[in-house]
Amino acid sequence: QVQLVESGGGLVQAGDSLRLSCALSGGTFDSYITGWFRQVQGEERDFVAAIVWETSFTWYVDSVKGRFTISRDNAKTTVYLQMDSLKPEDTAIYYCAAGVYKPQILPIRTSQYDNWGQGIQVTVSK
């Protein structure tokens, strides 16, 4: 059974940085894509970034391009989200997700991921 565990969230000030980690276990992930989503209470869960495990090809939502970087460590089966120049509007619960990569589909919808972490809070103060 695939499990994802996030870590690294917290409270920071605007302009600061945080690095989120997502440790994957319970499977082999060569054919997988791993994504980060975020959700504000009362709103939908939104796509942030994704990375193809085999090729390291990445996608980002426009609002985080140039500030966030997604990467993965094969040996540790861990995916990271480096978040720089954080803004108050980045405040949300961040979720790690994993699923089988389908090249013909943009990996920006929650329905494309079968496995989810428990979520971790990121709060950016002004």
Image (tube, rainbow, N blue to C red):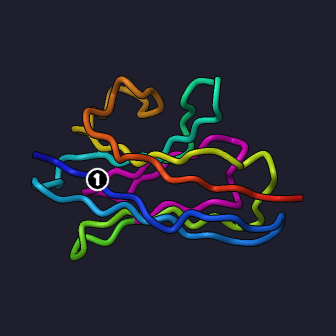
Tally of numbered discs:
1
Q: Is residue 74 above or below residue 22?
A: below
User: In the displayed structure, does residue 1 sit left or right of residue 107?
Assistant: left
Task: State the image coordinates of residue 37 (x, y, percent, origin top left).
Answer: 51, 41
Name the residue furthest right.
Answer: 126
User: In the displayed structure, does residue 64 sit left or right of residue 20?
Assistant: right
Q: Residue at x 24, y 66 (%)?
A: 77
Quarter where residue 107 is shown: top left
Task: State the image coordinates of residue 87 (x, y, percent, origin top left).
Answer: 80, 55
Task: State the image coordinates of residue 65 (x, y, percent, origin top left).
Answer: 68, 52
User: In the displayed structure, does residue 120 sit left or right of residue 56?
Assistant: right
Q: Residue at x 28, y 56 (%)?
A: 53
Q: Is residue 111 above or below residue 33?
A: above
Task: State the image coordinates of residue 17 (x, y, percent, origin top left).
Answer: 69, 71
In the rendered structure, does residue 64 fall within the stretch colored magenta? yes
Crowdedness near tag 1: few (<14), some (14–19) or many (≥20) residues, C-alpha within 10 Å? many
Magenta residues, start to end: 50-71
Quarter where residue 115 is shown: top left
In the rendered structure, does residue 79 fall within the stretch colored magenta? no
Q: The C terminus is located in which quarter?
A: bottom right
Q: The N terminus is located in which quarter?
A: top left
Give the structural element (helix, strand or loop) at label 1. strand
Q: Residue at x 70, y 56 (%)?
A: 123
- Residue type at mark 1 is Leu
Which residue in the protein does label 1 denote?
Answer: 4
